[in-house]
Image: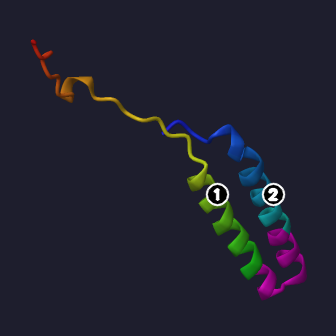
Amino acid sequence: MNGLAPEGYAYVVGLTLLAALVFLAALRLRSWPLWLGAFSLLILALCASWYFRGTTAAVYADLAVLFPRERS
C-alpha cells in the first residue's frame, strides 16, 4: 500500500477531527450517547481510509504468458 489517495484526505481528516471533537464533548459532558456517536464517527473514518487507500496494480512480467507470432 502507498498510503492514502489525495481525494480521500478531506474525508478522513474531517471525520477524524469531528470524532475527536465529539469525544471531547462526551468526556466533558459524561454522556454515553456521545461516546457511541464518537465511536461511530471513528469507525466511519477508518472505513473512509480503507476506501480511499492508495493501491497500485502489480504487474508480474515474469509470469506473463507470451505467445509467438502466427506465421502466415
Residue 38 placement (x, y as % from top left): 75, 73
Name the chief secondary structure element in magenta: helix
Range of residues picked out in magenta: 22-35
Is residue 16 found inside the magenta-colored segment of the image?
Answer: no
Q: Position of residue 64 (x, y in %)?
A: 21, 28
Task: Please tell me in which quadrant of the rendered image residue 15 appears.
Answer: bottom right
Mark 1 is surrounded, within 10 Å at the Cα level, by few (under 14), some (14 to 19) or many (20 or more) other residues, namely some
Which is more foreground, mark 2 or mark 1? Answer: 1
Q: Secondary structure at mark 2?
A: helix
In the structure shown, which secondary structural element does the residue marked by tag 1 occupy?
A: helix
Residue lying furthest top in this view? 71
Residue placed most toward the observer, 5 or 67: 67
Taking the view exactly as shown, the residue that stands out farthest to the left is 71
The image position of residue 62, as x and y in percent, is 20, 23
Q: Is residue 62 above or below residue 57?
A: above
Left/right of residue 44 with respect to residue 51 in the rendered view: right
| Left or right: 66, with 46 as reference point | left
| Residue 33 painted magenta | yes
| Image side of residue 59 versus residue 13, left or right | left
Residue pointed to by mark 1: 48
User: What residue would you read off at disc 2?
Assistant: 17
- For the point 28% across and 29% down, the residue is 60
Residue at 78%, 86% in the rendered image: 33
Q: Position of residue 50 (x, y in %)?
A: 56, 54
Identify the amino acid type marked 1.
Ala
User: According to the image, what is the colour scheme of the structure?
Assistant: rainbow
Amino acid type indicated by mark 2: Leu
Residue 34's tag is none
User: Which residue corresponds to the image point at 15% horizontal and 15% vertical from the top-left?
Assistant: 69
Q: Earlier in the sequence, mark 2 or mark 1?
A: 2
